[in-house]
Every structure is written in C-alpha cells, then in structure tokens.
Image: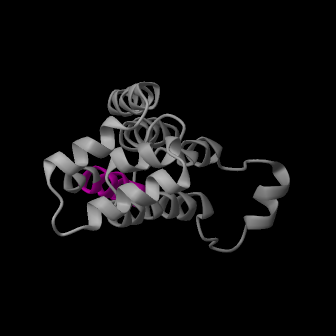
Amino acid sequence: MNNQKVVALNELLNSVDQKDFNLDVWKIKASLVVKKIFGSSDEKLELIEALHYDYSSWSLRDKTGSKQPDTVKAQAKGILESAILELAIGDSVHPVLIELQQELTGSEMSRLQQLLDDEGLDETRLMDYLSGISPQIKDKVLTQLLLKKYE
C-alpha cells in the first residue's frame, strides 16, 4: 500500500521539474494527495498552501540579470521528499498502536508492548489484556481509526 503512496508522491515530485509547471494546479493536486495519504490535519498541507511566487517589484528587481534558483520548486520538492521519507520510516508502527498510545496510560501501553514483544503471544493473552481496557477507550480508538481511514 505504501508503494502506491510513494508512486503518487514521486509523480508529484517529477511534475515539479516539468517545463509547463503551474504552481497553482500543482498545489491543488499535491494538497489532495497529501490529504488522502496523511490526513486533513497534516502540517504538510499548510506548507503546500504557503508556496507562492513573489512578484513584487523589489523581488523582480533583485532577480534581474542573473539566473536565480527557483526556491518555490525547491521547497515543493523538499515537502514531497520529506513525505516520502515519512512513509518509509512510518511503516514500523501499526496505526492501531498509534491510536492506543494516544489513549492508554504509560504503564498500560508498556504492558501492551511487552505482550506484543513476547514470543509466546497468543490470542487468548491478548484478548485478556484488551478486555481490561475500558469500553470508552476502545470505542474512541476504533472511531479514530475509522475517521483516519476515510479522511
């Protein structure tokens, strides 16, 4: 699944270097893709929206006469490259564990992690642990997982 996400981000990354690059169109595409992959509250969305060319007279005057690097394209590439890296390192933690970590106390999460790391873990021991978690917490975790799935 992450392969498809990386492919989509790489397509956006490659489009930055196209001769007919249009920042406004690219921002729309990038925002939709990033929102789908990382959720609507991800900070990369704000960074994408903040990208813009400065056409003020001071900016234009300062850039005349010499070839200047395109900082907007460099920033766009940086955002996408960091998103790809985030996907690469994010594989190690399961989304359920991330949500449980938000709701459980430190000792509860530590106990769960010990159970999961145990070589002899079986369904019965895990079910016993999960039955000790309050129904409100389980409902909240399940709700958060479903909401993230459909963001």
Residue nearest the observer in this picture, 123 or 44: 123
- SS majority, magenta: helix
* 57 falls in the magenta region: no
Q: Is residue 5 left or right of residue 82?
A: left
Q: Nearer the viewer, residue 47 or 145?
A: 145
Q: Is residue 75 above or below residue 5?
A: below
Nearer-the-camera pick, 120 or 142? 120
Decide: is 90 above or below 34: below
Residue 81 against residue 112 in the figure, above or below = below
Q: Is residue 133 above or below residue 119?
A: above
Q: How many marks?
A: 0
Looking at the rendering, the stretch of residues picked out in magenta corresponds to 6-18
Rendering quarter of residue 29:
top left
Residue furthest to the bottom in view is: 66
Q: Residue at x 42, y 49 (%)?
A: 98
Residue located 34% across and 53% down the image = 9
Q: Residue furthest right?
A: 58
